[in-house]
Image: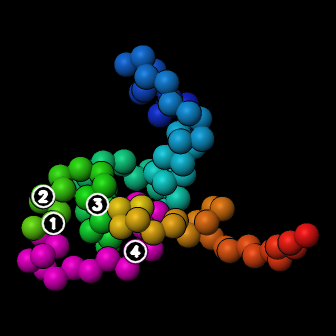
């Protein structure tokens, strides 16, 4: 899947960090089938903020307001939109260490 995504960008002369392409490939296959990476695929996503971060912001806002949708701020996209620390990767825990003043 990674090579296919890379070839799509390469056709337009766009170079994308392999880590980003790997995340996209993981997202598109994590349900066990190929899932398109477009707004149609995100329609089933419960997070309005994640949908807005992809495209068609005004349509998502209008639909969310009319249908009284809420966002639990569980996705990295929705957390970034509201200025929260992302709770995945290195942001999934807090590390405290004593500071010794000399």
Report helix, strand or loop for mark 1: helix
Looking at the image, is mark 1 or mark 3 nearer the viewer? Answer: 1
Q: Nearer the viewer, residue 13 or 99?
A: 99
Q: CA distance from mark 3 to mark 4?
A: 12 Å
Q: Residue at x 45, y 74 (%)?
A: 74
- Residue 52 versus residue 79 in the image, above or below: above
Q: Are marks 3 and 2 in contact (CB under 8 Å)?
A: no
Q: Quadrant of residue 73?
A: bottom left
Residue with the mark numbered 3? 51
**Residue range (magenta):** 63-79
Does the segment drawn in magenta span residue 64?
A: yes
Q: Earlier in the sequence, mark 3 or mark 4?
A: 3
Residue with the mark numbered 1? 61
Residue with the mark numbered 2? 58
Residue 30 percent across, percent down from the top left? 53, 59
Q: Quadrant of residue 19?
A: top right
């Amino acid at each position: 899947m990674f090579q296919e995504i890379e070839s799509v960008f390469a056709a337009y002369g766009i170079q994308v960090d392999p880590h980003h392409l790997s995340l996209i490939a993981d997202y598109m296959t994590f349900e066990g089938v190929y899932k398109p990476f477009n707004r149609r695929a995100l329609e089933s996503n419960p997070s309005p903020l994640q949908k807005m971060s992809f495209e068609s912001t005004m349509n998502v806002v209008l639909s969310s307001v009319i249908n009284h949708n809420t966002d639990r701020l569980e996705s990295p996209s929705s957390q970034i939109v509201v200025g929260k620390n992302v709770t995945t990767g290195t942001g999934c825990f807090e590390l405290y260490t004593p500071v010794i003043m000399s």
